[in-house]
Every structure is written in C-alpha cells, then in structure tokens.
Image (cartoon, helix red, strand yellow):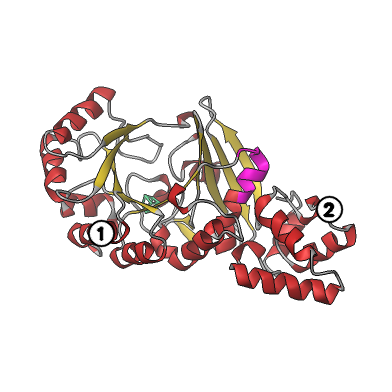
C-alpha cells in the first residue's frame, strides 16, 4: 500500500490486477510485456510477485528491471487500498482501517490465536441491511467493494503484518451475498492454484441469509464453509434485529442451508449472538432446537459486544453458559462459545470504521 494520496486517486484509472481471473491476468500481463518488448518469462515473475510474495507496490518487485516496475505501476493497480489506521489490541488482535480509491473507508481484522491466524475481511463499504446489533449497520451503506478490494485486504494484511492467514472469514463489513459477483471473483482469485492458491476449506463466508445465493455458493465453491447469522428462531424477532429476514424468512433460509449441506456434505455454523432480554430465554433455546432439527450444523454462541449506539447489553458468562445448557437439552451438534476478541480496539464488525467517522 502506498502512502501517497495521489496514487489513490489515480488507482481507479488503471486495471486492477487483483480483480482479474487467472486467464485474464495472463492475457493482460502477456499483452503488456509484448508491448514493452520484454521477454515472456517475466510473466511468471510478475505472477509470483503479485500473488505469492508480499509486495506493497510494484517497486518492491526487486528482481524486475526498475523501468519495468515503473511501467507496471503506470499501467496497472496492484493494491487499491491504503492503510489509514491500525490498532493493536491487548490480546494481539489487529484491526486495520483502509482508505478506498473510490472514497470512504473499510476495515479488516487479523486475529492470532495459538497456531491460527484468522483474517476477517469486508465485502461492502458499510452495509445496507442495518441489523440492530451491528455497528456497520449504524454507519449506513457507502457502496460495493470491487473484487480487487476484497482480495487486497488479504494480500495487504499479509504484506503489512508478515503474518500469513491460516483462515479467512468473510465476516467484516457488509453482507457478502448482496455483493455476490465480487465475492465469487474474490474466492476464485484467492483459491485458484495459479493465483493466491489459498485452501478453499479454510475460507468461511458468513451471511444473514439469502437463499439463492447460499445454493449458488454451494454449487460453485463446495469446499468453502458457510456460516449463518442466525440470532433468533422466530421470524418476528429475527425481522426486528435482521431486517432482511422480512424478505427472506427463516424457513426459506433454513431450507437453503439444508440444500447446501446435502450438496456439499458440510455442516453449517449457526452464529447466535446472545442479546440479554431479547433472545436468551429457555423458550428461545427450545425454538432454536426445533428449527434446526436434522440440519447438519454446529452452534457458535457469541456474547454481544456493546458499542455506544447499541441498545443491547453484554451477557454475563453465567447467562451464556445457561443458554448453552438449555440448547444442550435437545441439540446434539457441537456448541461453542466464542471468546470476544479485540474489545479495547472496537473489535466487533464495523466499530472501528464507525468510531473513525464520528471522530472525523
Ligand atoms: S450484521 Fe452483517 S448484514 Fe447485518 S448490518 Fe452488520 S454487516 Fe450488515
């Protein structure tokens, strides 16, 4: 990522290498090298640098001639994001706020944990869904990310931190299924063996539930894991906290999950955000058990992480454990309780960006 604002404003005028499919990349670089009178073997060098090594700019491609690096920079965009702020939590969670060439900011989070390094990436600038528990929803919607911006969060985090990911989760700002073309292309670039080559089994896409897109994801990327922001088993309550549930009621979403599971053979992760006094009674637990009966799944309980605009409070550990016990009475899949990470740096989705907007 370059620090020069002028290169940000220019970035949109040049083709973005990270948004190209494998064959498009090959054609673009082959044509470019031919026009520049460069030997064809340089193509492999550019590919290797772009996807596998950790350049922040074309200038870092140190075994290419200086003039060729300059011409690459004049002809293409490598990373279309510029780091604005990085915050490091007491628990080593790192959160980055990026400036976009198109204007506005997005965020990504790096979560180290024992032998795992999880990257949490965004798919939209803000989010149009406006879930009531989510800081991104409060910040409004600024626009769709382009495929290169989704991929650039991964390669940018890797280049800036030197910590390669073991897992990638599409759980940052935005609803991935509402920017699905860009998400599909980013998955292609991240998993293609001639491009980033990251294992599809170690990628999770998280959604609040768009049935057709869930099925399409299973068809196109059967190895990619799926997570549903579940949060309530009754449509009236779920619509209250996830407005998109009005358009895609839970019965349709759950049917899509069953179809996805039977096609891919994979369990879906059901994320359940525990909101005290809202969705954490014994009745809520019983309804969850009934709704997901027979669905190959695991449940991940998450304690709500408050932010200033939120009207919900944080559940006690005792409450989380009690809710888990109620679930265990009838749910036979695995139930985990997710540890909250990066609370001191506004760790929940969208919080750093929202705070930055308020401060500026
Ligand atoms: S939880 Fe996801 S879908 Fe809902 S507002 Fe936040 S980013 Fe959007």
Q: Can the viewer see residue 222?
A: yes
**Residue sitting at 45 percent across and 47 percent down?**
202
Residue 159 falls inside the magenta stretch:
yes
Q: Mark 2 Cα within 10 Å, few/some/many (few <14, many 20+)?
A: few
Q: Nearer the viewer, residue 15 or 187?
A: 187
Residue 22, position as x, y percentages in the image: 60, 67
Q: Residue at x 52, y 41 (%)?
A: 166
Question: Helix or strand or loop: what does disc 2 sit on?
Answer: loop
Contact flag, marks 1 and 2 (Cβ < 8 Å): no
**Residue at which label 2 appears:** 63
| Percent of width and height locating residue 345 | 51, 33
Check disc 1: other Cα within 10 Å, few if <14, some if 14-19, many if 20+: some
Q: Quadrant of the C terminus?
A: top right
Left or right of 92 in this view: 249: left
User: Residue 323: x percent and y percent?
Assistant: 19, 32
Q: Quadrant of residue 301?
A: top left
- 102 displayed left or right of 39: left
CA separation in Å, label 1 and label 2: 48 Å
Mark 1, residue position: 262
Q: Residue 11's mark?
A: none
Q: Main secondary structure of the magenta part?
A: helix
- Dot 1 falls on a residue whose secondary structure is helix
Quarter of the image holding residue 320?
top left
Vertical side of 195 occupied by 133: above or below: above
Q: In terms of sequence position, does the residue under pointer 1 or pointer 2 come before the other?
A: 2
Q: Position of residue 318 (x, y in %)?
A: 24, 23
Q: Residue at x 11, y 38 (%)?
A: 330
Q: Which residues are magenta?
A: 155-163
């Amino acid at each position: 990522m370059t620090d020069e604002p002028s290169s940000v404003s220019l970035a949109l005028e040049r083709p973005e290498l990270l948004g190209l499919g494998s064959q498009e990349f090959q054609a673009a670089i082959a044509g470019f090298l031919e026009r520049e009178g460069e030997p064809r073997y340089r193509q492999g060098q550019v590919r290797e640098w772009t996807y596998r090594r950790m350049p922040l700019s074309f200038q870092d491609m140190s075994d290419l001639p200086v003039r060729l690096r300059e011409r690459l920079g004049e002809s293409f965009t490598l990373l279309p994001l510029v780091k604005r702020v990085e915050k490091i939590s007491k628990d080593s969670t790192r959160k980055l706020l990026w400036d976009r060439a198109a204007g506005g900011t997005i965020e990504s989070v790096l979560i180290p944990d024992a032998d795992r390094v999880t990257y949490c990436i965004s798919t939209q600038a803000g989010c149009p869904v406006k879930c009531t528990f989510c800081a991104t929803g409060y910040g409004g919607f600024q626009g769709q990310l382009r495929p290169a911006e989704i991929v650039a969060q991964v390669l940018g985090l890797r280049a800036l931190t030197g910590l390669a990911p073991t897992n990638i989760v599409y759980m940052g700002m935005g609803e991935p299924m509402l920017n699905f073309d860009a998400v599909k292309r980013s998955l292609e670039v991240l998993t293609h063996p001639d491009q980033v080559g990251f294992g599809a089994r170690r990628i999770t896409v998280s959604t609040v539930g768009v049935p057709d897109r869930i099925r399409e994801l299973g068809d196109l990327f059967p190895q990619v894991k799926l997570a549903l922001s579940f949060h309530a088993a009754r449509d009236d309550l779920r619509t209250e906290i996830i407005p998109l549930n009005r358009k895609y009621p839970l019965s349709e979403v759950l049917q899509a999950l069953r179809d996805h599971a039977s096609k891919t053979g994979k369990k879906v992760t059901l994320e359940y955000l525990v909101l005290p006094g809202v969705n954490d009674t014994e009745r809520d637990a019983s309804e969850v058990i009934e709704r997901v009966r027979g669905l190959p799944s695991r449940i991940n309980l998450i304690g709500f992480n408050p932010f200033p605009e939120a009207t919900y409070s944080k559940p006690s550990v005792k409450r989380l454990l009690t809710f888990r016990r109620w679930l265990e009475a009838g749910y036979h899949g695995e139930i985990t309780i997710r540890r909250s990470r990066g609370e001191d740096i506004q760790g929940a989705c969208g919080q750093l960006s929202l705070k930055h907007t308020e401060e500026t």
